[in-house]
C-alpha cells in the first residue's frame, strides 16, 4: 500500500520538509543585509519578507500581520544579524514537532508477523 505522501507532488513534499527552515534562513539573510544597527529599512523589508513567507501557509490575516511586525522588529534590532536566531528557533521547533501517524505505520503495526 502506498503512503499518502508518495502521491503528493514533489514540490509539496519539499515545502513540507524544508519550508519553515527555508523561511527562517531567508529572514536571517534579510536581517544580515538590513541597513545598520537600527535600520528602519530592516523593519519594512523584514516585515514584507515575513508577509511573503507566511503567504504560503494557511494563516489568518491578523496572525500574518502580527508575525510580520515581529519579523520586521527582529530585522531592525541591533546584533541580531550575527546570530541566526530565526533559523535556530525554526529548526528547534521543527525538531520537536511530533510526527503524524501515517497509514503506512498503522498498516505495519497491524500486519501479522512473518514466520
Image (cartoon, grey):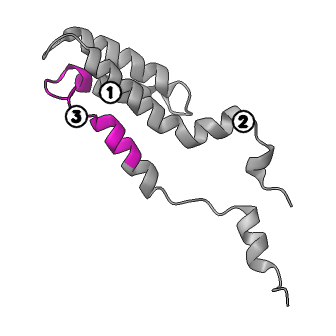
> Residue 22, image x and y in percent?
47, 32
Please tell me how crowded label 3 is: few (under 14), some (14-19), or many (20+) other residues with Cα within 10 Å: few
Q: Considering the numbered disc 3 on the image, is that residue within a helix, a strand or a loop?
A: loop
**Which residues, given as a range, are shown in magenta?**
73-91
- For this orientation, the residue located farthest to the bottom is 115
> Residue 18, image x and y in percent?
53, 38
Instruction: Please indicate, yes or no, whether residue 81 appears anywhere in the rendered image.
Output: yes
Of callouts 2 and 3, which one flags the residue occurring earlier in the amino acid sequence?
2
> Residue 78, image x and y in percent?
13, 23
Q: For mark 1, what is the residue?
A: 28
Kindly identify which numbered label has been placed on residue 83.
3
Q: For mark 2, what is the residue?
A: 10
Q: Is residue 44 above or below residue 115?
A: above
Kindly indicate the quadrant of the structure image that contains residue 68: top left
Of callouts 1 and 2, which one flags the residue occurring earlier in the amino acid sequence?
2
Q: For the C terminus, give its image quadrant.
A: bottom right
Q: For the N terminus, give its image quadrant.
A: bottom right
Kindly identify which numbered label has been placed on residue 89.
none
Amino acid at each position: 500500500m502506498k503512503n499518502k505522501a508518495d502521491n503528493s507532488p514533489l514540490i509539496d513534499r519539499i515545502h513540507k520538509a524544508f519550508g519553515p527552515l527555508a523561511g527562517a534562513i531567508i529572514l536571517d539573510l534579510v536581517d544580515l543585509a538590513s541597513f545598520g544597527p537600527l535600520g528602519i529599512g530592516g523593519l519594512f523589508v523584514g516585515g514584507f519578507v515575513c508577509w511573503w513567507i507566511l503567504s504560503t501557509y494557511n494563516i489568518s490575516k491578523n496572525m500574518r500581520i502580527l508575525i510580520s511586525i515581529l519579523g520586521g522588529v527582529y530585522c531592525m534590532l541591533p546584533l541580531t544579524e550575527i546570530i541566526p536566531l530565526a533559523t535556530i528557533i525554526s529548526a528547534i521547533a521543527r525538531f520537536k514537532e511530533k510526527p503524524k501517524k501515517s497509514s503506512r505505520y498503522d498498516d505495519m503495526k497491524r500486519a501479522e508477523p512473518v514466520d
